Amino acid sequence: MSTSDNFPALGPGAQAVRLSFWFITALAVLAALAWATSNVRRIPADSSAVVMRFGAYVRSQGAGLLVALPQPFETVLLVPGSERVLERRIVSLARDPGAPTQLGDASDALAGSGYVLTGDNGVVQVSATLFYRVSDPYAYALQLEHLDAALERIVSAAVAQTAAQRDLDSILVARPEMVAADQQMAARREQLRGDLARAVQRQLDALTAAHAGLGIEVSRMDLQASFPASAVDAFNAVLTSLQNAERDVAQARTLAEKTRQHAQQSADRIVQDAQASAAERAATAQSETSTIAQLEAALGANHDPGLLARAYRDRVQAVLAHAARVTTLDPNDASSLVLPGRAP
């Protein structure tokens, strides 16, 4: 007896149902296989995977093949790898004066955005971009929803703190004439980005110590500092005034130095003239008194007793020659001499 005798032939409707059953069964098997292998995937080289089972952290895995239970048993989150550098532009420091409000004016929220105070009470406009890497994939995945807002606050606070510890010249070249004269200030400007990156990293470390870390570490910071547009003209006017004042001071010092040199030359000339005149007068006095000095030396040694009388006779004639009339008296005569004079 053949098989066809035991099982009667199916009609067209039964055959259609039978085929539909096997087709649905095959689809179910394929769907079950797809669901069972849904978390078996390849992790790219620049990414990491965070595996969580019913919301609890299980493990982290780098690049390679990942085998995990299907959802909802285990959830796999892909996060950037530690080798990838991520970029975040700090929007709170980016000033957009053209952003209108409903009244057509600048938004009050942007009134002070991008402006920070320096240590010498100056104002500088700053824009910053943070470059960072993921150091803790689970913490990064956990805080991903709040990461942007946290970075905005952390970097803005670090920029304000770092700028307050410096003066205007150590942030940007405010006075070009001091660049060559102050190399230390130029070095501090070069260190500004590094100091800012370290300040941001310190705040991230503080969050990690408080068990609220963001799972990232700072790679570097890009910083652009400039004067506010409304203060450029005023600052240029101040620089012009300072330069004019320095020029006037230099000219005054030059004039004072020339006056001092002329006065010194005049004083030296007067002293030299006085010394020359004194030497000439001393030589004239010595010449005029040489005879008396010789006479005194001779009389003191008593070499020639008649020398005084001869000297008198030699010189009295020249003296008396200047007189209009000479009256001589005998010292041994007892007669009196009446001379004309003015009445009392």
Image: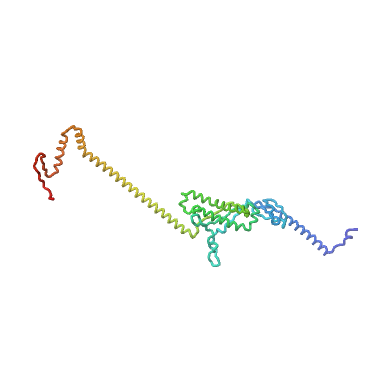
The image quadrant where one finds the N terminus is: bottom right
Q: Position of residue 128 (x, y in %)?
A: 55, 55
Q: Farthest residue to the bottom: give it.
A: 103
Viewer-closest of 334 and 17: 334
Image check: 51 left or right of 125?
Answer: right
Quadrant of the image occupied by residue 54: bottom right
Viewer-closest of 51 and 23: 51
Image check: 158 left or right of 262?
Answer: right
Q: How many marks?
A: 0
Q: Farthest residue to the top: give it.
A: 303
Which residue appears at 34% of the width and 49% of the height?
A: 260
| Residue 101, above or below 295 | below
Q: Farthest residue to the right: give it.
A: 1
Quadrant of the image occupied by residue 286: top left
| Residue 269, above or below 102 | above
Q: Position of residue 185 (x, y in %)?
A: 49, 50
Q: Position of residue 305 (x, y in %)?
A: 16, 33
Image check: 267 left or right of 202?
Answer: left
Image check: 55 left or right of 322?
Answer: right
| Rendered image coloring scheme | rainbow
Q: Farthest residue to the left: give it.
A: 335
